[in-house]
Amino acid sequence: MIRLIAGNVVHCGVKAHQEQYLDKNDLRDNTTYKIVIDAQGDLTTIGAAAINASTPDKPVLVYFAISAECQGMGYGKAAMILLLKMYDGLSLKVNPNNVHAVRLYAGLGFVFLNDPDQNGEVTGVRKST
């Protein structure tokens, strides 16, 4: 079972360049979560997520990563489903060249609205149901 645990996300099992992103970016204004596998109480951290909910009706996923050895197993999708249940109206930014992330988000109902911004990212929002 996948769980989200609020708190510090340093050393969350992601790649070194992703850890560096977490170290250099100020996430104090965001709610951060460790993504863990809960195997009968034995918790293994496999990733992290950060949500900026400073505008309550417009939460934004500002960081999401699953450790390389756990990718492709459905853990990212399970974690995103939990986040979507917690944050109504969640939007995100993603590099359109990150094919795996785009596929994950599109499969969860996100559509991408614009050409890449100065950081090379596009905005994703969920389709209305």
Image (cartoon, helix red, strand yellow):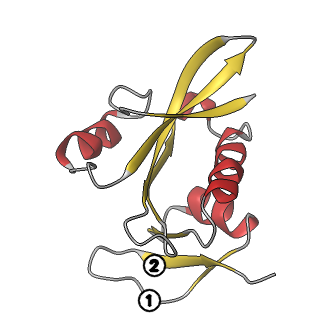
Mark 1 neighbour class, 10 Å CA radius: few under 14, some 14 to 19, many 20 or more: few
Task: Name the residue furthest left.
Answer: 24
Q: Residue at x 68, y 38 (%)?
A: 75
* Farthest residue, direction front: 56
Nearer-N-terminus badge (1/2): 1
Could you tell me if residue 85 is visible in this image? yes
Name the residue rendered at 27%, 46% in the picture. 21
Q: Secondary structure at mark 2?
A: strand
Quadrant for the C terminus, please.
bottom right
Question: On the image, which quarter does residue 113 sit in?
Answer: bottom right
Left or right, 22 with respect to 74, comes to left
Asked whether the residues under the numbered discs 1 and 2 touch, taking CB atoms below 8 Å apart as contact, a structural biologist would say: yes
Q: Which residue is mark 1?
A: 115
Q: Position of residue 115 (x, y in %)?
A: 44, 89
Instruction: Give the image quarter of residue 70.
Output: top right
Residue 67 in the image, given as x and y percentages of width and height: 51, 33
Helix, strand or loop at label 1? It is loop
Q: Is residue 32 left or right of residue 103?
A: left
Tag of residue 122:
2
x%, y% of residue 108?
73, 64
Question: Which quadrant of the rendered structure holds the N terminus?
Answer: top right
Does the rendering let one see residue 67? no
| Total number of numbered discs in the rendering | 2
Q: Label 1 sits on what residue type?
A: Asp
Q: Residue furthest bottom?
A: 114
What number is the disc on residue 39? Answer: none
Between 118 and 77, the residue placed more toward the observer is 77
Identified at 34% across, 75% down, the residue is 120
Amino acid type, label 2: Val
